[in-house]
């Protein structure tokens, strides 16, 4: 069973493991986009790194919202809450951290 909003299968995983996987996935995808934008500011990509970070922040917010909604529901769906919450917070943490670092070091201008 796959959940398209979580970018992966719906399986039970601990909070810390899902947070780490989401954080690393965001770093692997958004990090090179930021570096390409810094190295080639007039490239055809433009400000694509900002769009990538906004995408991960939006997916993180959707996942956190879904985790809080699932927490109130009875049944087996409650066992998925730690994984969904970890994914959401991992994406939010990585997107926020990367945008802050890129802004501080001047790699990306908002």
Image (tube, rainbow, N blue to C red):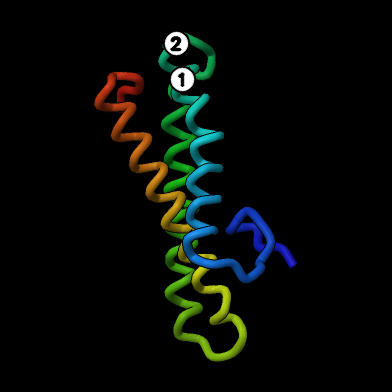
x 50%, y 51%: residue: 20
Residue at horizontal 59%, vertical 81%? Answer: 77
In this image, 110 relative to 30: left or right? Answer: left
In contact (CB < 8 Å): disc 2 and disc 1: yes
- Measured in 3D between alpha carbons, the distance from the residue under mark 2 to the one under mark 1, in whole angstroms, is 6 Å
Residue at the image point whose x is 46% and y is 77% from the top: 69
Does 8 sit above or below residue 106? below
> Mark 1 Cα within 10 Å, few/some/many (few <14, many 20+)?
some
- Disc 2 secondary structure class: helix
Q: Nearer the viewer, residue 80 or 53?
A: 80
Is residue 10 positioned above or below 18 on the image?
below
User: Residue 39 — which label?
Assistant: 2
Relative to 62, does residue 108 appear above or below in the rendering? above
Callout 2 crowding tier (Cα within 10 Å): few <14, some 14–19, many ≥20:
few
| Residue situated furthest bottom in the rendering | 74
Q: Which mark is residue 35?
A: 1
Q: Position of residue 33 (x, y in %)?
A: 50, 25
> From the image, which quarter does the N terminus lie in?
bottom right
x%, y% of residue 72? 45, 85
On residue 96, the disc is none
Q: Quadrant of the C terminus?
A: top left
Residue at 50 percent across and 11 percent down: it is: 43
């Amino acid at each position: 069973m796959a959940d398209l909003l979580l970018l992966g299968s719906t399986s039970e995983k601990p909070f810390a493991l899902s947070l780490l996987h989401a954080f690393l996935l965001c770093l692997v995808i958004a990090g090179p986009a930021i570096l390409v934008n810094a190295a080639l500011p007039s490239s055809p990509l433009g400000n694509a790194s900002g769009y990538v970070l906004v995408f991960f922040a939006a997916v993180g917010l959707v996942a956190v919202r879904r985790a809080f909604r699932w927490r109130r529901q009875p049944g087996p769906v409650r066992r998925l809450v730690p994984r969904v919450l970890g994914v959401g917070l991992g994406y939010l943490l990585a997107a926020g951290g990367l945008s802050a670092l890129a802004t501080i070091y001047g790699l990306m201008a908002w």
